[in-house]
């Protein structure tokens, strides 16, 4: 065996041991080299595709970014990569031995070269399914953590952090469009007495029950129900006038009272009730989130002073 034959044999063996797909095309897009990795994942043996056009073997590659990269390499001697974000599995390749499973995610690069005056290009295909899967899991994990950071752990509705973000967003939208925006601040009446009588564990059950009742009353996609802090809740009502918000607040108050959750003997009412303060933006006043919250909070305390289990509006009280 000559040195040249030995070198050729070693090169062929090395190409077949490489853990990626290697395809060499001539300037007519015909397949000159097709390593064992490609054969195992495409179902085509090298002898079957030899001298055939790559785009005949894989017709779906026509018009793809792979074809664009191949043409650029052979015509203009430009190397390139196929953007993975746009085409993560351009070649119909599957796990070795599996011809009906999902395609493997691929990183594809195309490199031109010249041999004895003739132009060729080398296509390298790497299986990146593992790293893509890990990246996907990391993204999903990050999204889950982000979502959890906006959810109150006890009640399952939005937390104060999300409330602040949503109120700022909706207030800016209302200012931009001139649409009304209403804010409700709610407080469970005599909650300290409830906790003292029933205990904190039952108090948590009460908070969760009221929170879910509030969420059930806010049916529009843009409405936000949030736990504002302690036994206080908030509702953001876009495209809602002060009068409409007052009517909705009374409906919420009546709904919570209708749950007939037994209150502590020391409480003002025999069942759990809400006091609600209402404030609104109408394009002329309360242009900042802090001012809107302060107005709703002022109205809430007016409802408390007025006897609880009632709705009060910034600037006046609403009948029960």
Image: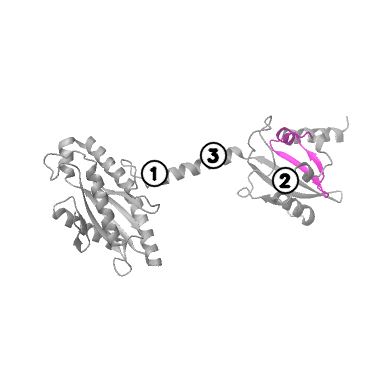
Q: What stretch is highlighted in magenta?
A: 18-45
Of the two numbered discs 2 and 1 on the same chain, state the one appearing first in sequence.
Answer: 2
Of mark 2 and mark 3, the one earlier in the sequence is 2
Checking the image for residue 234, the label placed there is: none
Say left or right for 59 vs 89: right
| 102 within the magenta span | no
Vertical position of residue 79 compared to residue 34: above or below: below
Residue at the image position 72 percent from the left and 47 percent from the top: 61
Q: Residue 134 carries which label?
A: 3
Query: Mark 2 and mark 3: span between their CA atoms?
Result: 28 Å
Q: Which mark is residue 60?
A: 2
Q: In this view, does 316 lie above or below 189?
A: below
Q: Which of 19 and 143 is in front in this view?
A: 143
What numbered label is drawn on residue 148?
Answer: 1
- Let me know if residue 21 is in the magenta part: yes
Identify the coloring: one colour
**Which x, y percent locates residue 217?**
32, 48
Front tag of 1 and 3: 1
Quarter of the picture containing the N terminus is top right
Q: Which of 71 and 250 is in front in this view?
A: 250
x, y percentage for residue 8?
83, 35
Q: Residue furthest right?
A: 2
- Say which element carries label 3: helix
């Amino acid at each position: 065996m000559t040195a040249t034959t030995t070198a050729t044999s070693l090169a062929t063996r090395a190409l077949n041991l490489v853990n990626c797909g290697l395809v060499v095309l001539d300037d007519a897009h015909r397949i000159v080299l097709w390593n064992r990795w490609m054969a195992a994942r495409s179902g085509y043996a090298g002898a079957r595709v030899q001298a055939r056009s790559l785009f005949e073997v894989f017709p779906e590659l026509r018009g793809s970014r792979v074809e664009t990269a191949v043409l650029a390499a052979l015509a203009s001697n430009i190397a390139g990569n196929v953007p993975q974000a746009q085409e993560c599995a351009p070649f119909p390749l599957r796990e070795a031995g599996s011809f009906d499973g999902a395609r493997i995610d691929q990183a594809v690069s195309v490199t031109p070269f010249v041999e004895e005056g003739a132009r060729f290009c080398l296509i390298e295909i790497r299986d990146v399914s593992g790293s893509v899967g890990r990246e996907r899991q990391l993204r999903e994990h990050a999204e889950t953590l982000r979502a959890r950071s906006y959810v109150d752990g006890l009640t399952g509705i939005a937390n104060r952090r999300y409330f602040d973000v949503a109120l700022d967003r909706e207030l800016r939208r209302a200012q931009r469009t001139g649409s009304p925006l209403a804010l409700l601040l709610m407080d469970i009446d005599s909650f300290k007495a409830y906790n003292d009588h029933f205990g904190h564990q039952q108090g948590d059950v009460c908070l969760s029950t009221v929170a879910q009742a509030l969420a059930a009353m806010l049916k529009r996609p843009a409405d936000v129900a949030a736990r504002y802090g302690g036994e206080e809740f908030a509702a953001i009502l876009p495209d809602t006038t002060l009068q409409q918000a007052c009517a909705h607040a009374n409906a919420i108050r009546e709904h919570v009272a209708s749950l007939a959750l037994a209150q502590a003997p020391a409480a003002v009412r025999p069942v759990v009730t809400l006091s609600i303060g209402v404030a609104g933006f109408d394009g002329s006043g309360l242009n900042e989130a802090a001012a809107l919250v302060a107005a709703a909070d002022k109205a809430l305390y007016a409802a408390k002073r007025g006897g609880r289990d009632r709705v009060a509006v910034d600037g006046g009280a609403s009948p029960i």
